[in-house]
């Protein structure tokens, strides 16, 4: 999605653009996620502002492309007092940090969605800034949008060398003024020395999807719960977070071991996407763990009610992530910029980060 966003914005600025994709179709992390445009998860300041800019550009691009999205907003649910304490503190800090959100009573939560179980619910944090897209439809449909803008889209055409003004591929050479490398978790093909010293690693996530829910049943807001509060950097501003972390470490060590938190979103056809876990390392396990899927399902069943829980798909995705940075930008030579390492915020930040890249490159 980072590559698509860069190509789209460059073309909109009147540039002549060629987009190279090594696969015959998109198959990586950009297809294998929740489809959440999630500004509330970004830390206050620069990253949150970039996420909001990205959201605005997403809305423009999706409208022009006539691709579906849901202005769902988000709900973070609280079922323990320490979770409610974090949500309350975050709500109090929010105006000064730039977030627009409010703390809801259990009764008000139930008016926003029919997908939440009322038992044990103490409240929820509502934010209206989040969008939900269907990543398979959007990422699959976006190349046609680029082609209509005059972008030359080359699938099945890996870039094997860059020495400006020449870009080398197995299918020919192109002469260009600038190159933006959005190679995801491919650290070996281009500039391996840069990646070897970058601090980037890989993260593997296990996810699932139900069959389409019957009739016109809607999830409503994208959902998160207490485990998520220890995951997104925005909540680190809360002094109450330490007690929540300590309880989960004591009572649910397996969720810390696999860095599991639970998110719930809905695809365009009505299916429900559930996840996820986080396994870090340069070479994540090829095979998925049934134990992880069961932990995710056990947790999400404590607060989610669905008409049909039958699973249609299970999969994993792998993305590039840096332990300390929100993303990686490197310029290994004049006119060449590497942009990757956005971790789990690739969809959220794609357009905002592309906008910044093109501005800094004066493109």
Image: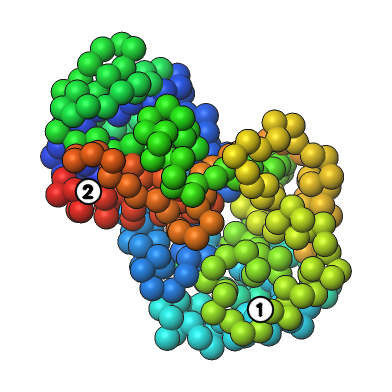
- Asked whether residue 265 appears in the rendered view, the answer is yes
- Examine the rendered structure and indicate whether residue 6 appears above or below residue 37: above
User: In which quarter of the view is residue 240 placed?
Assistant: bottom right
* Direction from residue 236 to residue 331 in the image, left or right: left
User: In which quarter of the view is residue 23 placed?
Assistant: top left
* Residue in view at x 47 percent, y 70 percent: 43
Sort mark 1 into few (<14), some (14-19) or many (20+) by Cα contacts within 10 Å: many
- Residue at disc 1, secondary structure: helix
Q: CA distance from mark 2 to mark 1?
A: 37 Å
Residue 31 position in % (x across, y down) = 53, 37
Residue 55 position in % (x across, y down) = 38, 58
Mark sitting on residue 138? none
Residue 104 position in % (x across, y down) = 63, 81
Q: Which residue is mark 1?
A: 241
- Examine the rendered structure and indicate whether residue 38 appears above or below residue 198: below
Question: Observer-nearest residue: 269 or 360?
Answer: 360
* Residue in view at x 33 percent, y 37 percent: 181
* Residue in view at x 69 percent, y 50 percent: 277
Q: Quadrant of the N terminus?
A: top left
Mark sitting on residue 358? 2
Sort mark 2 into few (<14), some (14-19) or many (20+) by Cα contacts within 10 Å: some
* Direction from residue 346 to residue 235 in the image, left or right: right
- Examine the rendered structure and indicate whether residue 98 appears above or below residue 188: below
């Amino acid at each position: 999605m980072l590559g698509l966003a860069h190509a789209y914005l460059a073309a909109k600025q009147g540039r002549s653009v060629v987009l190279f994709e090594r696969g015959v179709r998109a198959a990586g992390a950009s297809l294998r996620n929740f489809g959440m445009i999630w500004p509330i998860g970004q830390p206050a300041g620069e990253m949150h502002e970039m996420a909001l800019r990205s959201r605005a550009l997403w809305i423009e691009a999706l409208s022009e492309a006539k691709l579906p999205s849901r202005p769902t907003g988000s709900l973070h649910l609280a079922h323990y007092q320490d979770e409610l304490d974090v949500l309350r503190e975050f709500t109090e800090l929010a105006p000064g940090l730039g977030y627009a959100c409010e703390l809801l009573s259990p009764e008000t939560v139930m008016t926003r969605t029919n997908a939440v179980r009322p038992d044990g619910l103490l409240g929820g944090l509502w934010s209206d800034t989040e969008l939900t897209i269907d990543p398979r439809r959007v990422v699959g449909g976006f190349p046609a949008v680029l082609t209509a803008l005059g972008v030359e889209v080359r699938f099945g055409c890996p870039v094997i060398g860059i020495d400006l003004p020449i870009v080398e591929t197995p299918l020919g050479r192109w002469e260009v003024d600038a190159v933006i490398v959005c190679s995801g978790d491919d650290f070996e093909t281009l500039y391996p020395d840069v990646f070897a010293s970058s601090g980037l690693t890989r993260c593997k996530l296990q996810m699932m999807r139900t069959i389409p829910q019957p009739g016109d049943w809607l999830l409503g807001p994208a959902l998160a719960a207490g485990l998520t509060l220890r995951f997104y950097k925005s909540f680190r501003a809360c002094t109450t977070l330490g007690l929540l972390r300590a309880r989960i470490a004591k009572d649910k060590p397996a969720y810390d071991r696999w860095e599991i938190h639970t998110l719930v979103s809905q695809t365009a056809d009505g299916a429900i996407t559930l996840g996820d876990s986080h396994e870090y390392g340069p070479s994540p396990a090829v095979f998925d763990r049934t134990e992880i899927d069961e932990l995710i399902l056990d947790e999400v069943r404590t607060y989610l009610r669905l008409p049909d829980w039958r699973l249609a798909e299970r999969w994993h995705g792998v993305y590039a992530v840096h332990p300390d940075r929100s993303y990686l930008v490197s310029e290994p030579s004049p006119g060449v910029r590497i942009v990757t390492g956005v971790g789990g915020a690739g969809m959220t930040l794609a357009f905002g980060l592309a906008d910044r890249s093109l501005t800094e490159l004066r493109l």
